[in-house]
Image (cartoon, rainbow, N blue to C red):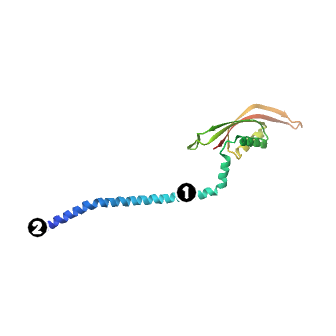
Amino acid sequence: MNRPLFSIVFLAGAGLAAFFFTWPSLQDFQFLQLEKRSKAKEFENREEYFANLTSLERQLKDFGPELARLDYALPEDTSLPSLYQLLQEVAAGSGVVLKSISAQVAKGPLRLGDEASDSLKTITLEVKVAGPYESFKQFLQSAQNAWRLLSIDSVAFVSPPSTLRLRSGLGASSSFEVSFRMQAYSY
């Protein structure tokens, strides 16, 4: 056989053998490089995530007093006596007479935004008060601003106004009996 032809065939065979034996290793190497970049990006994202959590924790510490008020507004127990006392204080402070209170406690699910909460308890209150119209307005405002989270669902006039004459003869004032349906919440 001819020596140059043998050299060409040998070099071509060696080149093909090197190609077929190194190609899978090259593919593995490229795959590992891609995986390394992917893991590095994931690591960066996790570092950023934990840095954001640390930042949020610092911000939450700044809102400590406000969050404490929220815990106070949404207590862990239903505590109906304290709720009744709150309504009595609001009624007395606004100048209406508290005639009756009834309550019914229901446990979740309650829709808050996009999430359902099974642990949130809803306390439905039926409250009847009597007094002048200005005092009702003050009662509504005081109930909205109370330390406990109260929402007023409905207001209904139970009795027509009765005209009361003042003993001093200075004029007349109208007295109404109004029924409120309210809701309070607890965990």
Left or right for 52, reference 68: left
Relative side of 23 to 164, left or right: left
**Residue lying at the far right of the rendered structure:** 168
Q: Position of residue 170 (x, y in %)?
A: 87, 38
* Nearest the eye: 153 or 121: 121
Quarter of the rendering occupied by the C terminus: top right
Amino acid type of the residue that numbered disc 2 sits on in the rendered structure:
Asn
Residue 158 or residue 38, whichever sits in front: 38
Q: Quadrant of residue 96?
A: top right
Please, what is the three-letter code of the amino acid marked with disc 1?
Leu
- Mark 1 crowdedness (10 Å alpha carbons): few <14, some 14-19, many ≥20: few
Residues at discs 2 and 1 in contact (Cβ within 8 Å): no
From the top left corner, tell me how far across and down residue 110 is, in percent: 59, 40
List the single residue furthest toward the left.
1
Q: Is residue 179 above or below residue 145?
A: above
Mark 2 falls on what kind of element?
loop
Q: Position of residue 87 (x, y in %)?
A: 74, 41
Q: Seen from this angle, which residue lies furthest bottom?
A: 3
Label annotation for residue 2:
2
Residue under label 1? 53
Q: Is residue 160 above or below residue 185?
A: above
Q: Is residue 172 above or below residue 58?
A: above
Query: Mark 2 or 1 closer to N-term?
Result: 2
Residue neighbourhood size for the residue with mark 2, other residues' Cα within 10 Å, grouped as few (<14), some (14–19), many (≥20): few
Disc 2 versus disc 1: distance between alpha carbons? 75 Å
Q: Residue at x 26, y 61 (%)?
A: 21
- When asked about the image quadrant of residue 7, the answer is bottom left
Identify the secondary structure beneath mark 1. helix
Between 140 and 115, the residue placed more toward the observer is 115
